[in-house]
Image: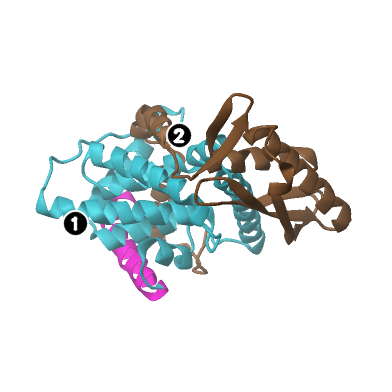
Chain colours: A cyan, B brown
Amino acid sequence: MSRASSSDVSHTDTARRTRDQADGELVRRARLGDKRAFGALAERHGPAMYRFARRMLNDHEAVEDSVQDALVAAWTSIDRFRGDSAPRTWLFGILANMIRRRLRSAARYPTDELPTELPAARSTDPVTAAQAADLLEALEVALADLPEAQRACWILAEVERMSYADIARVQATTVGSVRGAVHRARQNLERRLEPWR
Amino acid sequence: MAVNGEADGKRPERDVLARAAEGMREITDDGWVRVRGSVLARVLRTVRPTRHVIGRHAYGAFTVASGVLVSQVRDAVDGHDERVRVLDVRCATDDQGHLESVSIAVSVLFGSRIARVTASTRAVTAERISRTIGTDFPLDRVIVDLHVADVHPSADA
């Protein structure tokens, strides 16, 4: 990936601000009892929340329950959301908390491993699509071997493109810890994906 | 793309990892597609805990959830004047659940005539509350305490 130019950064910042403003409006309406607004918020962030939970938990039911429980908790407590963070960060924070609880419980009561369920790659060129799918599969396997904190921080930073400050909120830790975890995760993943260079 | 102030550089191993991350970002898990409907339905079936407010109609008393009242006020005020956006609505009731006051916080568009906006917001709020909890309910028991909590720029600013 090429180095980001200042215009790229500015574009991304603008896109993030626009997204956060739209989320803020949905939160405002949802706080005032508008279920459709909350539904729209859940639709916007549900796929990313599921993506994150899916890579952190080892059980289909646990993934579904965690996302559902997180959204229910968000809905029932939304009047206490004061806008100290972006709505997306707030939603991920609730979800990450649910996941941590489940992981602690799963350590005591292990479940069957989640079968590999890889989505089709988007490319229409079969060779490119196959390569992309293989690379994704290799990443999934490498990710699964990472320690939980590294995995969570790397996904939030590199896949969900959250700032370290937001990840620290989500993971209930410090920015320094996040930076360290992402760095170590990167090194581990780069080593595992070396054959793909 | 460097989100956290760290340049991605041109190292090939980083390029592969960035490509893989991008691939993961662009796909929607089949699992989400499968459970999306049931998850959202379950969430939207969940009722938020709310107090009840007593209303009156020609045949006697009834109760209405304060959340419904709040939602009604938002709907009325938001829909009445695009210069005003409701930020918060609080209903205060006595021990029996009779509505004593409604406190509404709004954001108004920069440059709006505050006094005019305030008066119309108060009128719309009182009218909707009255309609929701019953026309026989005396309006003088509803105190609309309105304050301006914020200003927002126009959409094209």
Determine contact: label 2, label 1, CB under 8 Å.
no
Instruction: Magenta stretch: give its range.
Output: A175-197
Whether residue B37 appears in this view of the structure is yes
Toward the viewer: B4 or A61?
A61
Q: In the rendering, at what x and y percent does residue A47 appear?
A: 43, 39
Q: Secondary structure at mark 2?
A: helix
Residue type, label 1: Arg
Residue situated in front as seen by the camera: B13 or A171: A171
- For the point 41% across and 72% down, the residue is A175
Q: Picture quarter containing residue A26?
A: top right
Q: Main secondary structure of the magenta part?
A: helix
Name which residue lies at 35% across and 30% down: B35
Q: Is residue A196 magenta?
A: yes
In this rendered view, identify the residue nearer to me: B79 or A170. Answer: B79
- Real-space CA distance between mark 2 and mark 1, rounded to the nearest whole angstrom: 28 Å
Identify the residue shown where x is 40% and y is 59%: B14
- Which residue lies at the image location 69% right of the left edge and 33% below the top edge? B136
Q: Which residue is mark 2?
A: B44
Q: At label 2, which amino acid type do we have?
A: Leu
Circle 1 residue:
A104
> Does residue B72 appear left or right of residue A195 in this picture?
right
